[in-house]
Image: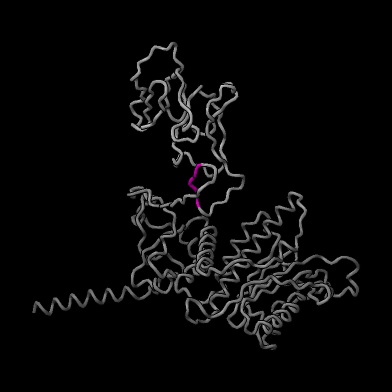
Amino acid sequence: MATSNENQAKGKKTGEKRARKNPNPNQKRGQPTAAARLISSPYIKFGWHKPLSGEVKEAVQRVSSMADSMYMLQIERERPIESLSIRNGLFWEQRQLVNDSMVSTPAVDHIDLFPDDDALFQETLRKIGKHFMDDNTFAMHYLFSKMRTREFLILPVEVHGYWVTVIAQMRRKTGDFLKTGLVEDLDREVTNLAIIDPVLTNREYRRTLITSRLTSILCEGCIELSDTNTASRDIAVLEINGEEDGRVSDPKWKTGLVAYAISREFLRRLKTLQWRRDHGVSSNEEDLLWAPFEEHYNFDAYRQSLMAACAYQTIEMSGYQVRLALEVPSEDSNYQHKSLSHINNSSFFERDEKWEVFQSPTHTFIVRLGVEPRPEARPRLSSPNYTPMSPPFVPLYAAAYDAETTPREASFHGNPLREAHSEQNAPVAPMEQHNLSPIPGLSLVNSPESMHASLPADVVKQEYDEPTLKRHLPDDDDYDEDMEVDADEDQPASKKLKIEPSGAEMEMY
């Protein structure tokens, strides 16, 4: 009996768990839901204890479709891009211009403007066509309300699953263009037109279809697209194929990301154009606007940028009632991380130039120096492949003391108290020369001149303290023959100099 009761309780709990998996039929579209957990951080506070206000719920429901444009980008890496995502992404990108009224980015995803079937296109054309009034006027579709007043048009178009980017530059016609006074008169014209299609297969067919349909569409807005007055521009892009990482896949999903990347790049060029016009900088606008898209494709970076644009489109339209969060999704949240990740190896993040505070050891970058012999000069250490931009600096040694040369005329070059093969005395680039007044009769150990020179009877007490050379001249000739002049106690023993009487050499030990 007890076992039966336990099974009933267990079944009841299981049924409740299964019931919770089913969507709530009373839940409104866009109502906040708990689909994942957030990464804890001291910068966010736990907020489940307080319910959301009605104002916040209304704001969230208002931007629910915008949230969809971001969420659908996190389902699968090779999922085709939908027009909802491109539309919201471009809306946000356009608002980053100082003067966003320079360009039109209309949303046409709710109507099929570029079908293959002519009858279907004529039906769509009637929906956006002119409506005639009784007072000899007509009304245009709201599609043309901003398009007619702006200089540029950016219009990503989907044809058979392939995304093609249409970019046009327009202006108001000049001269006597109203010939008949009828509604068919066109008062604006397209001066430049670029159709960017990164897929070679059936490219010409898509280009012809788009040009034909676009001519009829713009005519309903009294904008002329003609072969004579419109210059065809070619923004060159890399071709997309179905091969990636040694495997073949459908390239359609890539075209949507490239369409967004090209549109975003053209908006960046418009930012530059605005700055040049505002500051009176004369430049060739054609070279700026219609230059090739010189960039290696990075589809994952394009997707991430589009996600960020859609997310901030949602945040701003909600009045910042929502914010970004890093979620930790559960198994029931319709999230497959393996289908999104593009990281193939564990060394992917080793490219980051991170600074590890507790890393030990710290000096792990090994540099090997080669020895390059220098004829008629002491050798110096340098890289075998290093080529200085200016003539090499050759340290000179102090010449032997010449009775005919006054102390003011002789000079030391470089550091006279370092060994000839010392790394510290081997500059690889020109250095500033410091001229020091010589000590009469003092020569360098191991130098060519020291082999034939000796100290005179007057021995000078010398102390060497790096990085400067200090000279101390004696007050008289009384000194201890075995006197040893030491450097500071902190200096290593190699910096101590021993001075011996006349006839001896100065040594460093």
Q: Is residue 88 above or below residue 474?
A: below
Q: Is residue 431 above or below residue 276?
A: above
Please state the extent of the stretch shown in magenta in the rendering. 378-383
Compared across the picture, whether 241 is left or right of 113 comes to left
Residue in front for this viewpoint, 247 or 191: 247
Residue in front for this viewpoint, 177 or 426: 426
Residue 397: percent from left, percent from top: 52, 34
Residue in front for this viewpoint, 46 or 158: 158
| Image quadrant where residue 163 sits | bottom right
| Image quadrant where residue 258 sits | bottom right
Q: Residue at x 74, y 49 (%)?
A: 279
Q: Residue furthest left?
A: 1
Residue 244: percent from left, percent from top: 50, 77
Q: Residue at x 65, y 69 (%)?
A: 106
Compared across the picture, whether 145 is left or right of 18 comes to right
Residue 159: percent from left, percent from top: 62, 81
